[in-house]
Image: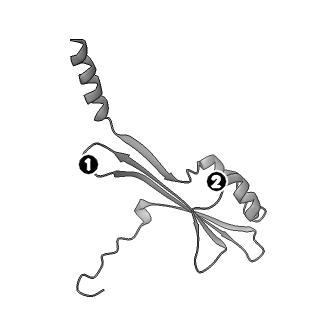
């Protein structure tokens, strides 16, 4: 009886799944603390940490990207939430704009299977 109970608990716990956070989880309070026109790159790094990436064409655009995925046994991971925060700085390195995007803002790109 005891072995059956232990086996049942182990079996059920294996089906629970996990939630994984990839990237920089930025809370709304963190965004509210940013001040356009007064915070510079160092201030932003102190508040939010290093950006996930920077624009390849413009070093004055920083991106903070977060994916929250849920994984269940024998299934592909499911995207629960995607957050992308874009910060731009002026030529002097002062915060110029803050934009937040979600997965609804993403564009679906279908590759052309005929040519590459």
Residue at the image position 44 percent from the left and 46 percent from the top: 20
Residue at the image position 67 percent from the left and 73 percent from the top: 60
* Front in this rendered view, residue 59 or 92: 59
* Front in this rendered view, residue 63 or 38: 63
Residue 69 lies, with reference to residue 52, above or below; the image says above
Residue 22 located left or right of residue 27 = left
Point out the tag, 2 or 1, that comes first from the N-terminus.
2
Residue 15 lies, with reference to residue 22, above or below; the image says above
For the N terminus, the image quarter is: top left
- Contact check, label 2 and label 1, Cβ < 8 Å: no
Residue at the image position 25 percent from the left and 29 percent from the top: 11
* Front in this rendered view, residue 47 or 22: 22
For mark 2, what is the residue? 31
Q: Secondary structure at mark 2?
A: helix
Residue at the image position 44 percent from the left and 65 percent from the top: 105
For mark 1, what is the residue? 75
* Front in this rendered view, residue 32 or 43: 43
How many residues crowd around disc 2 within 10 Å: few (fewer than 14), some, or many (20 or more)? some
Residue 24, position in %: x, y? 56, 53
Residue 32 located left or right of residue 11 = right
Residue 22, position in %: x, y? 48, 53
């Amino acid at each position: 009886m005891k072995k059956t109970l232990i086996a049942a608990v182990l079996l059920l716990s294996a089906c629970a799944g996990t939630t994984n956070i990839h990237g920089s989880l930025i809370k709304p309070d963190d965004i509210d603390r940013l001040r356009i026109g007064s915070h510079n790159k160092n201030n932003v790094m102190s508040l939010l940490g290093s950006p996930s990436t920077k624009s390849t064409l413009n070093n004055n655009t920083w991106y903070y990207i977060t994916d929250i995925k849920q994984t269940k046994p024998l299934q592909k991971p499911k995207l629960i939430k995607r957050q992308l925060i874009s910060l731009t700085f002026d030529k002097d390195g002062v915060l110029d704009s803050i934009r937040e995007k979600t997965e609804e803002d993403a564009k679906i790109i279908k590759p052309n299977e005929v040519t590459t």
